[in-house]
Image (tube, rainbow, N blue to C red):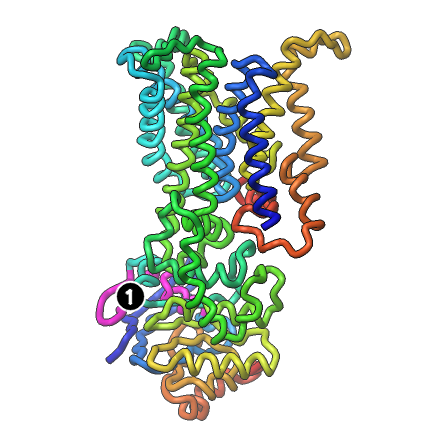
Amino acid sequence: MRVQLRHRLGYLTALLVALALPQVIYPGLALDIVVWGLFAVSLDLLLGFGGLLSFGHAAFWGSAGYAAGLAAKHLGVPFPVAVLAGVTVAVLLALPIGYLSIRRQAIYFAMVTLAFAQMLFYVTNEWRGLTGGENGLQAIPRTFPGLTLPSGSAAFYYAALPLALLGYWLAWRAVHSPFGHVLVAIRDNEARAQALGYPTRRYKVLGFVLSAALAGLAGSLFALGHGFAALELLHWTTSGLVVMMVILGGVGTLWGSVIGAAVVLLLRDWLSTSTLTLAGVSLKDAWGVVTGVIFVLIVLSFRRGVWGTLLQLRLPRGGSRPAPRAGQTTAGGPSAADGG
Amino acid sequence: MALLETDSLIKDFRGFRAVNDVSLRIEEETIHALVGPNGAGKTTLFNLLSKFLQPSAGRILYRGEEITALRPEQIARRGVARSFQITSLFEQLTILEHVALALQADTALGYRFWQSERVLDQFRERALAILDEVGLRDLAEREVHALPYGQKRSLEMALVLARDPALLLLDEPTAGMGREDVERMIALIRRAGTGRTVVLVEHNMGVVAELADRVTVLQRGSVLAEGTYAAVRDDPQVIEAYLGQTHA
Protein backbone atom coordinates (compact mmCIF):
# COMPACT_ATOMS: atom_id res chain seq x y z
CA MET A 1 0.00 0.00 0.00
CA ARG A 2 1.32 3.44 -0.91
CA VAL A 3 0.62 5.04 2.44
CA GLN A 4 2.40 2.25 4.23
CA LEU A 5 5.43 2.59 1.96
CA ARG A 6 5.53 6.31 2.64
CA HIS A 7 5.42 5.62 6.39
CA ARG A 8 8.27 3.13 6.11
CA LEU A 9 10.37 5.60 4.13
CA GLY A 10 9.63 8.19 6.79
CA TYR A 11 10.84 5.94 9.60
CA LEU A 12 13.92 4.91 7.62
CA THR A 13 14.81 8.56 7.03
CA ALA A 14 14.35 9.33 10.72
CA LEU A 15 16.63 6.43 11.66
CA LEU A 16 19.33 7.61 9.22
CA VAL A 17 19.09 11.14 10.60
CA ALA A 18 19.41 9.77 14.14
CA LEU A 19 22.50 7.77 13.14
CA ALA A 20 24.15 10.67 11.32
CA LEU A 21 23.28 13.33 13.89
CA PRO A 22 26.48 13.21 16.03
CA GLN A 23 28.55 13.57 12.84
CA VAL A 24 26.71 16.74 11.87
CA ILE A 25 26.35 18.48 15.22
CA TYR A 26 28.42 17.84 18.32
CA PRO A 27 27.42 14.62 20.13
CA GLY A 28 26.25 16.32 23.33
CA LEU A 29 23.68 18.36 21.41
CA ALA A 30 22.67 15.31 19.37
CA LEU A 31 21.96 13.41 22.59
CA ASP A 32 20.01 16.37 23.96
CA ILE A 33 17.78 16.40 20.88
CA VAL A 34 17.11 12.65 21.07
CA VAL A 35 16.32 12.57 24.81
CA TRP A 36 14.39 15.86 24.98
CA GLY A 37 12.50 14.63 21.91
CA LEU A 38 11.56 11.48 23.82
CA PHE A 39 10.59 13.58 26.84
CA ALA A 40 8.33 15.70 24.62
CA VAL A 41 6.84 12.58 22.99
CA SER A 42 6.04 11.21 26.47
CA LEU A 43 4.16 14.41 27.27
CA ASP A 44 2.31 14.34 23.93
CA LEU A 45 1.17 10.80 24.68
CA LEU A 46 -0.58 12.19 27.75
CA LEU A 47 -1.66 15.56 26.35
CA GLY A 48 -2.44 14.76 22.73
CA PHE A 49 -4.00 11.35 23.23
CA GLY A 50 -5.21 11.45 26.83
CA GLY A 51 -6.22 15.12 26.81
CA LEU A 52 -4.33 15.65 30.08
CA LEU A 53 -1.93 18.59 30.32
CA SER A 54 0.71 17.78 32.91
CA PHE A 55 2.59 20.81 34.07
CA GLY A 56 4.82 18.77 36.34
CA HIS A 57 6.52 16.31 34.06
CA ALA A 58 9.92 17.48 35.29
CA ALA A 59 9.11 15.34 38.35
CA PHE A 60 9.61 12.15 36.34
CA TRP A 61 12.41 13.38 34.11
CA GLY A 62 14.30 14.71 37.13
CA SER A 63 13.66 11.97 39.69
CA ALA A 64 14.71 9.37 37.11
CA GLY A 65 17.82 11.39 36.34
CA TYR A 66 18.80 11.43 40.01
CA ALA A 67 17.93 7.76 40.52
CA ALA A 68 19.95 6.68 37.48
CA GLY A 69 22.84 8.87 38.62
CA LEU A 70 22.79 7.46 42.15
CA ALA A 71 22.65 3.89 40.88
CA ALA A 72 25.58 4.47 38.51
CA LYS A 73 27.64 6.39 41.06
CA HIS A 74 27.12 4.39 44.25
CA LEU A 75 26.33 0.92 42.96
CA GLY A 76 28.57 1.09 39.92
CA VAL A 77 26.01 -0.64 37.74
CA PRO A 78 26.34 -0.56 33.93
CA PHE A 79 24.43 2.34 32.41
CA PRO A 80 21.42 0.37 31.07
CA VAL A 81 20.77 -0.88 34.60
CA ALA A 82 21.03 2.67 35.90
CA VAL A 83 18.44 3.67 33.29
CA LEU A 84 16.20 0.87 34.51
CA ALA A 85 16.54 2.21 38.07
CA GLY A 86 15.56 5.66 36.84
CA VAL A 87 12.49 4.38 34.99
CA THR A 88 11.44 2.36 38.05
CA VAL A 89 11.59 5.40 40.32
CA ALA A 90 9.60 7.47 37.81
CA VAL A 91 6.92 4.77 37.65
CA LEU A 92 6.75 4.42 41.44
CA LEU A 93 6.27 8.19 41.78
CA ALA A 94 3.78 8.36 38.91
CA LEU A 95 1.43 5.81 40.47
CA PRO A 96 0.38 7.92 43.49
CA ILE A 97 0.80 11.28 41.70
CA GLY A 98 -1.27 10.08 38.74
CA TYR A 99 -3.89 8.47 40.97
CA LEU A 100 -4.38 11.72 42.88
CA SER A 101 -4.10 14.21 39.98
CA ILE A 102 -6.49 12.59 37.51
CA ARG A 103 -9.30 13.26 39.97
CA ARG A 104 -9.11 16.84 38.76
CA GLN A 105 -9.85 18.12 35.28
CA ALA A 106 -8.19 20.55 32.87
CA ILE A 107 -6.35 23.45 34.51
CA TYR A 108 -6.79 21.92 37.98
CA PHE A 109 -5.06 18.78 36.79
CA ALA A 110 -2.17 20.90 35.50
CA MET A 111 -1.95 22.73 38.83
CA VAL A 112 -1.95 19.52 40.90
CA THR A 113 0.83 17.99 38.79
CA LEU A 114 2.80 21.23 39.14
CA ALA A 115 2.33 21.12 42.90
CA PHE A 116 3.68 17.56 43.14
CA ALA A 117 6.67 18.47 40.98
CA GLN A 118 7.42 21.46 43.20
CA MET A 119 7.24 19.26 46.30
CA LEU A 120 9.76 16.91 44.73
CA PHE A 121 12.00 19.85 43.82
CA TYR A 122 12.14 21.05 47.43
CA VAL A 123 12.62 17.57 48.86
CA THR A 124 15.55 17.00 46.49
CA ASN A 125 17.03 20.36 47.42
CA GLU A 126 16.80 19.64 51.15
CA TRP A 127 17.97 16.03 51.04
CA ARG A 128 21.60 17.05 50.61
CA GLY A 129 23.10 13.83 51.91
CA LEU A 130 21.64 11.90 49.03
CA THR A 131 21.22 14.41 46.23
CA GLY A 132 24.00 16.90 46.85
CA GLY A 133 21.47 19.71 47.27
CA GLU A 134 22.35 22.75 45.17
CA ASN A 135 25.55 21.15 43.92
CA GLY A 136 23.66 18.23 42.46
CA LEU A 137 25.23 14.88 41.69
CA GLN A 138 28.58 15.32 40.04
CA ALA A 139 30.80 12.97 38.07
CA ILE A 140 28.27 10.24 37.35
CA PRO A 141 30.12 7.41 35.62
CA ARG A 142 28.82 5.61 32.54
CA THR A 143 30.11 2.09 32.53
CA PHE A 144 29.38 -0.65 30.14
CA PRO A 145 31.18 -3.97 30.46
CA GLY A 146 34.37 -3.72 28.40
CA LEU A 147 33.79 -0.16 27.24
CA THR A 148 34.43 3.36 28.42
CA LEU A 149 31.87 5.89 27.36
CA PRO A 150 33.12 9.43 27.98
CA SER A 151 30.57 12.12 28.78
CA GLY A 152 29.41 14.02 25.70
CA SER A 153 30.94 11.46 23.36
CA ALA A 154 29.53 9.97 20.21
CA ALA A 155 30.22 6.58 21.82
CA PHE A 156 27.66 7.25 24.54
CA TYR A 157 25.25 8.66 22.00
CA TYR A 158 25.31 5.42 20.02
CA ALA A 159 25.09 3.34 23.19
CA ALA A 160 22.06 5.32 24.37
CA LEU A 161 20.30 5.50 21.01
CA PRO A 162 18.79 1.98 21.07
CA LEU A 163 17.22 2.65 24.47
CA ALA A 164 15.79 5.95 23.28
CA LEU A 165 14.46 4.31 20.11
CA LEU A 166 12.84 1.66 22.28
CA GLY A 167 11.09 4.49 24.12
CA TYR A 168 9.92 6.08 20.87
CA TRP A 169 8.67 2.74 19.63
CA LEU A 170 6.76 2.14 22.86
CA ALA A 171 5.01 5.52 22.56
CA TRP A 172 4.05 4.78 18.96
CA ARG A 173 2.86 1.30 19.90
CA ALA A 174 0.76 2.58 22.81
CA VAL A 175 -1.00 5.06 20.53
CA HIS A 176 -1.69 2.31 17.96
CA SER A 177 -2.86 -0.29 20.46
CA PRO A 178 -6.28 -1.23 21.85
CA PHE A 179 -5.28 0.92 24.82
CA GLY A 180 -4.67 3.87 22.50
CA HIS A 181 -8.22 3.59 21.13
CA VAL A 182 -9.70 3.65 24.62
CA LEU A 183 -7.49 6.58 25.65
CA VAL A 184 -8.60 8.66 22.67
CA ALA A 185 -12.23 7.70 23.35
CA ILE A 186 -11.93 8.89 26.96
CA ARG A 187 -10.32 12.12 25.79
CA ASP A 188 -13.17 12.77 23.34
CA ASN A 189 -16.03 11.72 25.59
CA GLU A 190 -15.41 10.38 29.05
CA ALA A 191 -19.07 9.86 30.02
CA ARG A 192 -19.66 7.81 26.89
CA ALA A 193 -16.65 5.63 27.60
CA GLN A 194 -17.90 5.06 31.16
CA ALA A 195 -21.34 4.10 29.90
CA LEU A 196 -19.68 1.47 27.71
CA GLY A 197 -18.15 -0.02 30.83
CA TYR A 198 -14.63 1.44 30.77
CA PRO A 199 -13.24 2.36 34.19
CA THR A 200 -11.93 5.63 32.81
CA ARG A 201 -9.86 6.65 35.84
CA ARG A 202 -7.87 3.46 35.70
CA TYR A 203 -7.12 4.07 32.03
CA LYS A 204 -6.03 7.61 32.72
CA VAL A 205 -3.71 6.46 35.50
CA LEU A 206 -2.21 3.87 33.15
CA GLY A 207 -1.67 6.56 30.51
CA PHE A 208 -0.09 8.80 33.12
CA VAL A 209 2.27 6.07 34.33
CA LEU A 210 3.29 5.10 30.79
CA SER A 211 4.03 8.71 29.98
CA ALA A 212 6.04 9.09 33.20
CA ALA A 213 8.01 5.92 32.43
CA LEU A 214 9.06 7.35 29.05
CA ALA A 215 9.88 10.72 30.61
CA GLY A 216 11.96 8.80 33.16
CA LEU A 217 13.78 6.89 30.42
CA ALA A 218 14.62 10.20 28.73
CA GLY A 219 15.67 11.85 32.00
CA SER A 220 17.94 8.94 32.95
CA LEU A 221 19.73 9.08 29.60
CA PHE A 222 20.05 12.84 29.89
CA ALA A 223 21.66 12.72 33.37
CA LEU A 224 23.95 9.82 32.48
CA GLY A 225 24.93 11.43 29.20
CA HIS A 226 25.96 14.67 30.85
CA GLY A 227 27.50 12.97 33.86
CA PHE A 228 25.59 15.07 36.37
CA ALA A 229 22.12 15.52 37.82
CA ALA A 230 21.30 19.06 38.89
CA LEU A 231 18.24 20.62 40.50
CA GLU A 232 17.36 22.18 37.17
CA LEU A 233 16.12 18.75 36.07
CA LEU A 234 13.24 19.15 38.54
CA HIS A 235 12.65 22.87 38.10
CA TRP A 236 9.22 24.01 36.90
CA THR A 237 10.83 25.70 33.90
CA THR A 238 11.79 22.22 32.70
CA SER A 239 8.12 21.20 32.81
CA GLY A 240 7.25 24.40 30.94
CA LEU A 241 9.92 23.92 28.31
CA VAL A 242 8.72 20.43 27.39
CA VAL A 243 5.12 21.65 27.10
CA MET A 244 6.40 24.35 24.76
CA MET A 245 8.23 21.76 22.63
CA VAL A 246 5.05 19.70 22.24
CA ILE A 247 2.95 22.71 21.27
CA LEU A 248 5.62 23.93 18.82
CA GLY A 249 5.73 20.55 17.12
CA GLY A 250 1.98 19.98 17.19
CA VAL A 251 -0.14 18.45 19.94
CA GLY A 252 -1.40 14.94 19.17
CA THR A 253 1.08 14.27 16.37
CA LEU A 254 3.64 12.35 18.46
CA TRP A 255 6.59 12.92 16.07
CA GLY A 256 5.95 16.63 15.95
CA SER A 257 7.23 16.77 19.52
CA VAL A 258 10.69 15.68 18.33
CA ILE A 259 10.69 18.53 15.80
CA GLY A 260 9.62 20.92 18.55
CA ALA A 261 12.46 19.72 20.79
CA ALA A 262 15.00 19.99 17.97
CA VAL A 263 13.89 23.52 17.06
CA VAL A 264 14.19 24.75 20.67
CA LEU A 265 17.55 23.08 21.34
CA LEU A 266 19.18 24.04 18.04
CA LEU A 267 18.00 27.59 18.49
CA ARG A 268 19.38 27.75 22.02
CA ASP A 269 22.68 26.31 20.88
CA TRP A 270 22.96 28.65 17.94
CA LEU A 271 22.10 31.72 20.05
CA SER A 272 24.56 30.76 22.78
CA THR A 273 27.46 31.05 20.35
CA SER A 274 26.00 33.85 18.31
CA THR A 275 27.58 37.29 18.25
CA LEU A 276 24.41 38.93 16.98
CA THR A 277 23.13 41.91 18.91
CA LEU A 278 19.75 43.53 18.76
CA ALA A 279 19.32 47.07 20.10
CA GLY A 280 22.56 46.78 21.99
CA VAL A 281 21.62 43.51 23.70
CA SER A 282 23.56 40.41 22.82
CA LEU A 283 21.19 37.65 21.69
CA LYS A 284 23.44 35.26 23.55
CA ASP A 285 22.08 36.56 26.84
CA ALA A 286 18.50 36.64 25.67
CA TRP A 287 17.85 33.18 24.28
CA GLY A 288 14.72 32.90 26.43
CA VAL A 289 13.25 36.04 24.91
CA VAL A 290 14.10 34.95 21.36
CA THR A 291 12.67 31.46 21.87
CA GLY A 292 9.58 32.99 23.43
CA VAL A 293 9.01 35.30 20.48
CA ILE A 294 9.44 32.45 18.01
CA PHE A 295 7.07 30.31 20.08
CA VAL A 296 4.40 33.01 19.99
CA LEU A 297 4.87 33.52 16.25
CA ILE A 298 4.57 29.81 15.47
CA VAL A 299 1.55 29.31 17.69
CA LEU A 300 -0.17 32.33 16.16
CA SER A 301 0.53 31.37 12.56
CA PHE A 302 0.38 27.56 12.76
CA ARG A 303 -2.17 26.59 15.34
CA ARG A 304 -1.41 22.90 14.92
CA GLY A 305 2.31 23.38 15.37
CA VAL A 306 5.05 22.76 12.81
CA TRP A 307 4.43 19.08 12.17
CA GLY A 308 0.66 19.28 12.57
CA THR A 309 0.54 21.99 9.91
CA LEU A 310 2.70 19.97 7.51
CA LEU A 311 0.41 16.95 7.93
CA GLN A 312 -2.61 19.15 7.41
CA LEU A 313 -1.19 20.51 4.15
CA ARG A 314 -0.49 17.03 2.87
CA LEU A 315 -3.82 15.41 3.70
CA PRO A 316 -6.28 17.03 1.26
CA ARG A 317 -4.18 15.80 -1.66
CA GLY A 318 -4.23 12.24 -0.38
CA GLY A 319 -7.45 11.45 -2.25
CA SER A 320 -8.98 8.18 -1.10
CA ARG A 321 -6.70 7.61 1.83
CA PRO A 322 -7.81 5.15 4.49
CA ALA A 323 -9.56 6.58 7.52
CA PRO A 324 -6.95 8.00 9.85
CA ARG A 325 -6.25 5.91 12.89
CA ALA A 326 -7.39 7.18 16.21
CA GLY A 327 -5.22 10.02 17.33
CA GLN A 328 -3.08 10.08 14.22
CA THR A 329 -5.32 12.73 12.79
CA THR A 330 -4.05 16.22 13.03
CA ALA A 331 -6.90 17.70 15.02
CA GLY A 332 -4.89 17.98 18.20
CA GLY A 333 -6.18 21.48 18.81
CA PRO A 334 -9.37 20.68 20.74
CA SER A 335 -7.62 18.32 23.10
CA ALA A 336 -5.04 20.93 23.89
CA ALA A 337 -7.82 23.32 24.68
CA ASP A 338 -9.52 20.75 26.88
CA GLY A 339 -6.28 19.95 28.61
CA GLY A 340 -5.60 23.57 29.38
CA MET B 1 -39.81 -10.25 39.23
CA ALA B 2 -38.57 -6.69 39.22
CA LEU B 3 -35.25 -6.24 37.44
CA LEU B 4 -34.77 -2.68 38.64
CA GLU B 5 -36.30 -1.10 41.73
CA THR B 6 -35.98 2.23 43.43
CA ASP B 7 -36.85 2.78 47.05
CA SER B 8 -37.82 6.33 48.06
CA LEU B 9 -35.31 7.96 45.75
CA ILE B 10 -34.57 11.63 46.42
CA LYS B 11 -32.29 14.06 44.61
CA ASP B 12 -31.72 17.59 45.86
CA PHE B 13 -29.86 20.32 43.99
CA ARG B 14 -29.02 23.21 46.33
CA GLY B 15 -32.40 23.32 47.99
CA PHE B 16 -34.34 22.30 44.87
CA ARG B 17 -35.82 18.81 45.03
CA ALA B 18 -35.65 17.44 41.47
CA VAL B 19 -36.68 13.89 42.40
CA ASN B 20 -38.95 13.43 45.38
CA ASP B 21 -39.53 10.06 47.01
CA VAL B 22 -39.77 7.98 43.84
CA SER B 23 -40.31 4.24 44.25
CA LEU B 24 -40.38 2.36 40.97
CA ARG B 25 -40.59 -1.29 40.00
CA ILE B 26 -39.37 -2.13 36.50
CA GLU B 27 -40.54 -5.66 35.70
CA GLU B 28 -38.30 -7.98 33.72
CA GLU B 29 -38.81 -8.08 29.94
CA THR B 30 -41.09 -5.07 29.82
CA ILE B 31 -40.76 -1.68 28.17
CA HIS B 32 -41.31 0.94 30.81
CA ALA B 33 -41.71 4.60 29.85
CA LEU B 34 -41.00 7.58 32.08
CA VAL B 35 -43.03 10.57 30.95
CA GLY B 36 -44.06 13.94 32.32
CA PRO B 37 -44.16 17.61 31.45
CA ASN B 38 -40.93 19.60 31.14
CA GLY B 39 -39.15 19.91 34.45
CA ALA B 40 -40.88 16.86 35.92
CA GLY B 41 -37.52 15.29 36.84
CA LYS B 42 -37.39 12.60 34.14
CA THR B 43 -33.84 13.30 33.10
CA THR B 44 -32.63 13.57 36.69
CA LEU B 45 -34.29 10.27 37.52
CA PHE B 46 -32.74 8.74 34.40
CA ASN B 47 -29.30 9.93 35.45
CA LEU B 48 -29.84 8.48 38.92
CA LEU B 49 -30.77 5.11 37.42
CA SER B 50 -27.76 5.11 35.10
CA LYS B 51 -25.55 6.20 38.05
CA PHE B 52 -24.35 9.41 36.42
CA LEU B 53 -25.85 11.17 39.46
CA GLN B 54 -25.77 10.08 43.10
CA PRO B 55 -29.12 10.21 44.93
CA SER B 56 -29.39 12.37 48.06
CA ALA B 57 -31.36 9.58 49.73
CA GLY B 58 -33.01 6.27 48.88
CA ARG B 59 -31.82 3.06 47.29
CA ILE B 60 -31.57 1.52 43.82
CA LEU B 61 -31.72 -2.25 43.41
CA TYR B 62 -30.78 -4.22 40.30
CA ARG B 63 -31.63 -7.93 40.29
CA GLY B 64 -32.40 -7.52 43.99
CA GLU B 65 -28.89 -6.25 44.71
CA GLU B 66 -28.18 -2.75 45.91
CA ILE B 67 -26.32 -0.66 43.29
CA THR B 68 -26.84 2.78 44.84
CA ALA B 69 -23.14 3.47 45.42
CA LEU B 70 -21.77 2.01 42.17
CA ARG B 71 -20.17 4.02 39.36
CA PRO B 72 -21.54 4.06 35.78
CA GLU B 73 -18.88 1.69 34.43
CA GLN B 74 -19.65 -0.79 37.19
CA ILE B 75 -23.32 -1.13 36.34
CA ALA B 76 -22.38 -1.14 32.64
CA ARG B 77 -20.37 -4.27 33.37
CA ARG B 78 -23.39 -5.84 35.05
CA GLY B 79 -25.48 -5.56 31.90
CA VAL B 80 -26.96 -2.08 32.02
CA ALA B 81 -26.48 0.05 28.90
CA ARG B 82 -27.60 3.64 28.49
CA SER B 83 -28.00 5.91 25.50
CA PHE B 84 -27.47 9.65 25.56
CA GLN B 85 -29.98 12.30 24.65
CA ILE B 86 -27.46 14.72 23.30
CA THR B 87 -25.78 12.53 20.74
CA SER B 88 -22.63 11.69 22.47
CA LEU B 89 -19.97 10.08 20.32
CA PHE B 90 -16.22 10.01 19.79
CA GLU B 91 -15.53 12.52 17.05
CA GLN B 92 -12.32 10.96 15.77
CA LEU B 93 -13.36 7.32 15.43
CA THR B 94 -15.05 5.68 12.48
CA ILE B 95 -18.47 4.12 12.87
CA LEU B 96 -16.97 0.65 12.88
CA GLU B 97 -14.40 1.67 15.48
CA HIS B 98 -17.21 2.95 17.69
CA VAL B 99 -18.94 -0.40 17.73
CA ALA B 100 -15.64 -2.26 18.10
CA LEU B 101 -14.88 -0.10 21.12
CA ALA B 102 -18.22 -1.06 22.66
CA LEU B 103 -17.54 -4.75 21.99
CA GLN B 104 -13.99 -4.45 23.31
CA ALA B 105 -15.28 -3.08 26.62
CA ASP B 106 -16.13 -6.59 27.82
CA THR B 107 -12.53 -7.72 27.43
CA ALA B 108 -9.29 -6.63 29.10
CA LEU B 109 -7.78 -5.79 25.69
CA GLY B 110 -8.01 -2.09 26.46
CA TYR B 111 -5.08 -2.28 28.86
CA ARG B 112 -2.76 -3.82 26.27
CA PHE B 113 -0.67 -0.86 25.26
CA TRP B 114 2.01 -3.20 23.89
CA GLN B 115 -0.25 -4.92 21.37
CA SER B 116 -1.11 -3.84 17.85
CA GLU B 117 -4.52 -2.34 17.22
CA ARG B 118 -4.98 -5.08 14.62
CA VAL B 119 -6.27 -7.38 17.39
CA LEU B 120 -9.41 -5.26 17.21
CA ASP B 121 -10.12 -6.84 13.80
CA GLN B 122 -11.61 -9.76 15.73
CA PHE B 123 -14.65 -7.56 16.49
CA ARG B 124 -15.16 -6.63 12.84
CA GLU B 125 -17.71 -9.29 11.94
CA ARG B 126 -19.86 -8.75 15.02
CA ALA B 127 -19.63 -4.99 14.66
CA LEU B 128 -20.78 -5.18 11.04
CA ALA B 129 -23.69 -7.41 12.03
CA ILE B 130 -24.82 -4.89 14.64
CA LEU B 131 -24.43 -2.03 12.16
CA ASP B 132 -26.54 -4.01 9.73
CA GLU B 133 -29.25 -4.23 12.37
CA VAL B 134 -29.43 -0.46 12.76
CA GLY B 135 -28.99 0.22 9.03
CA LEU B 136 -25.48 1.66 9.10
CA ARG B 137 -23.47 -1.16 7.60
CA ASP B 138 -22.72 0.68 4.36
CA LEU B 139 -21.28 3.61 6.29
CA ALA B 140 -19.02 1.53 8.53
CA GLU B 141 -15.76 3.16 7.49
CA ARG B 142 -17.03 6.73 7.71
CA GLU B 143 -15.89 9.06 10.44
CA VAL B 144 -18.66 10.00 12.75
CA HIS B 145 -18.54 13.80 12.56
CA ALA B 146 -19.73 13.61 8.95
CA LEU B 147 -22.94 11.71 9.84
CA PRO B 148 -26.40 13.29 9.69
CA TYR B 149 -28.28 13.56 12.96
CA GLY B 150 -30.68 10.65 12.45
CA GLN B 151 -27.84 8.27 11.73
CA LYS B 152 -25.94 9.45 14.78
CA ARG B 153 -28.97 8.39 16.81
CA SER B 154 -28.91 4.99 15.12
CA LEU B 155 -25.23 4.65 15.99
CA GLU B 156 -26.15 5.51 19.57
CA MET B 157 -28.48 2.49 19.50
CA ALA B 158 -25.78 0.35 17.92
CA LEU B 159 -23.49 1.13 20.86
CA VAL B 160 -26.20 0.14 23.32
CA LEU B 161 -26.88 -3.10 21.42
CA ALA B 162 -23.19 -3.95 21.19
CA ARG B 163 -23.16 -4.22 24.96
CA ASP B 164 -25.82 -6.98 24.70
CA PRO B 165 -27.38 -5.58 27.87
CA ALA B 166 -30.12 -7.06 30.06
CA LEU B 167 -31.40 -3.57 30.80
CA LEU B 168 -31.51 -0.73 28.27
CA LEU B 169 -31.86 2.82 29.54
CA LEU B 170 -32.86 5.00 26.59
CA ASP B 171 -32.86 8.77 26.96
CA GLU B 172 -35.33 10.23 24.44
CA PRO B 173 -34.27 7.99 21.56
CA THR B 174 -36.51 9.77 19.04
CA ALA B 175 -35.82 13.37 20.08
CA GLY B 176 -35.46 15.68 17.11
CA MET B 177 -36.18 12.96 14.54
CA GLY B 178 -38.33 13.17 11.44
CA ARG B 179 -41.38 10.93 11.07
CA GLU B 180 -39.66 8.21 9.03
CA ASP B 181 -36.70 8.02 11.40
CA VAL B 182 -39.12 7.76 14.33
CA GLU B 183 -40.87 4.79 12.69
CA ARG B 184 -37.56 3.02 12.16
CA MET B 185 -36.46 3.75 15.73
CA ILE B 186 -39.71 2.31 17.12
CA ALA B 187 -39.19 -0.88 15.14
CA LEU B 188 -35.59 -1.03 16.29
CA ILE B 189 -36.45 -0.58 19.97
CA ARG B 190 -39.16 -3.22 19.69
CA ARG B 191 -36.70 -5.71 18.20
CA ALA B 192 -33.94 -4.78 20.63
CA GLY B 193 -36.36 -5.01 23.55
CA THR B 194 -37.33 -8.60 22.82
CA GLY B 195 -36.10 -10.67 25.72
CA ARG B 196 -34.73 -7.57 27.41
CA THR B 197 -35.93 -4.87 29.75
CA VAL B 198 -36.18 -1.29 28.54
CA VAL B 199 -36.58 1.97 30.44
CA LEU B 200 -37.45 4.81 28.14
CA VAL B 201 -37.61 8.55 28.78
CA GLU B 202 -39.78 9.93 26.01
CA HIS B 203 -41.61 13.11 25.06
CA ASN B 204 -43.32 11.71 21.99
CA MET B 205 -46.61 10.17 23.22
CA GLY B 206 -47.04 8.35 19.92
CA VAL B 207 -43.84 6.44 20.64
CA VAL B 208 -44.94 5.73 24.20
CA ALA B 209 -48.33 4.48 23.02
CA GLU B 210 -46.68 2.12 20.53
CA LEU B 211 -43.98 0.73 22.75
CA ALA B 212 -44.63 0.97 26.45
CA ASP B 213 -46.06 -1.86 28.54
CA ARG B 214 -46.05 0.37 31.61
CA VAL B 215 -45.97 4.14 31.92
CA THR B 216 -44.90 6.17 34.94
CA VAL B 217 -45.99 9.81 34.87
CA LEU B 218 -43.82 12.22 36.84
CA GLN B 219 -44.70 15.70 37.96
CA ARG B 220 -42.50 18.04 39.98
CA GLY B 221 -40.22 15.17 40.87
CA SER B 222 -42.91 12.83 42.18
CA VAL B 223 -44.84 9.93 40.70
CA LEU B 224 -48.24 11.21 39.63
CA ALA B 225 -49.66 8.05 38.09
CA GLU B 226 -48.59 4.64 36.89
CA GLY B 227 -50.19 1.99 34.69
CA THR B 228 -50.71 1.04 31.08
CA TYR B 229 -50.68 3.84 28.51
CA ALA B 230 -54.45 3.66 28.10
CA ALA B 231 -55.00 3.89 31.86
CA VAL B 232 -52.74 6.86 32.52
CA ARG B 233 -53.96 8.69 29.41
CA ASP B 234 -57.45 8.84 30.88
CA ASP B 235 -56.31 9.71 34.38
CA PRO B 236 -57.78 13.16 35.17
CA GLN B 237 -54.69 14.16 37.17
CA VAL B 238 -52.46 13.36 34.23
CA ILE B 239 -54.64 15.32 31.84
CA GLU B 240 -54.48 18.28 34.17
CA ALA B 241 -50.70 18.04 34.50
CA TYR B 242 -50.33 18.07 30.74
CA LEU B 243 -52.90 20.81 30.12
CA GLY B 244 -51.36 23.52 28.04
CA GLN B 245 -48.32 21.35 27.31
CA THR B 246 -47.62 20.33 23.76
CA HIS B 247 -47.27 16.63 23.22
CA ALA B 248 -44.66 17.01 20.50
A114 or A173, nearer to the observer: A173
- Along the viewing direction, whichever of B105 and A247 lies nearer the viewer: B105
Where is residue A4 drawn, in percent x and y? 57, 46
Considering only vertical position in the picture, is B197 above or below A153?
Answer: below
- Image x and y of residue B100, in percent: 44, 61
Kind of residue at badge 1: Gly
Task: Give x and y (percent) for residue B20.
Answer: 36, 70
Answer above or below: position of A174 versus A299. below
Quadrant for residue B106, please give it: bottom left
Count of marks, rendered view:
1
Q: Is B62 part of what is drawn in magenta?
A: yes
Classify 10 Å Cα crowding around label 1: few (below 14), some (14-19), many (20 and above): some
Residue depicted at x 48% and y 61%: B98
Relative vertical location of residue B131 with respect to residue B110 in this rendering, above or below? below
Is residue A133 visible in this depiction of the protein?
A: no
Question: Is residue A127 located in the magenta-colored stretch of the structure?
Answer: no
Q: In the drawing, does residue B167 fall left or right of residue A161?
A: left
Question: Dot 1 corresponds to which residue?
Answer: B58
Give the residue at x 34% y 66%. Answer: B10
The quadrant the N terminus of chain B occupies is: bottom left
**Residue range corresponding to the magenta coloring:** B43-68
Q: Nearer the viewer, residue A43 or A12?
A: A12
The quarter of the rendered structure image containing the C terminus of chain B is bottom right
Q: Chain of mark 1?
A: B
What is the x, y in percent for residue A136? 39, 10
Residue A137 visible at all: yes
Location of residue B176 (image quadrant): bottom right
User: For numbered disc 1, what is the local secondary structure?
Assistant: strand
Does residue B19 appear to the left or right of A311 in the view shown? left
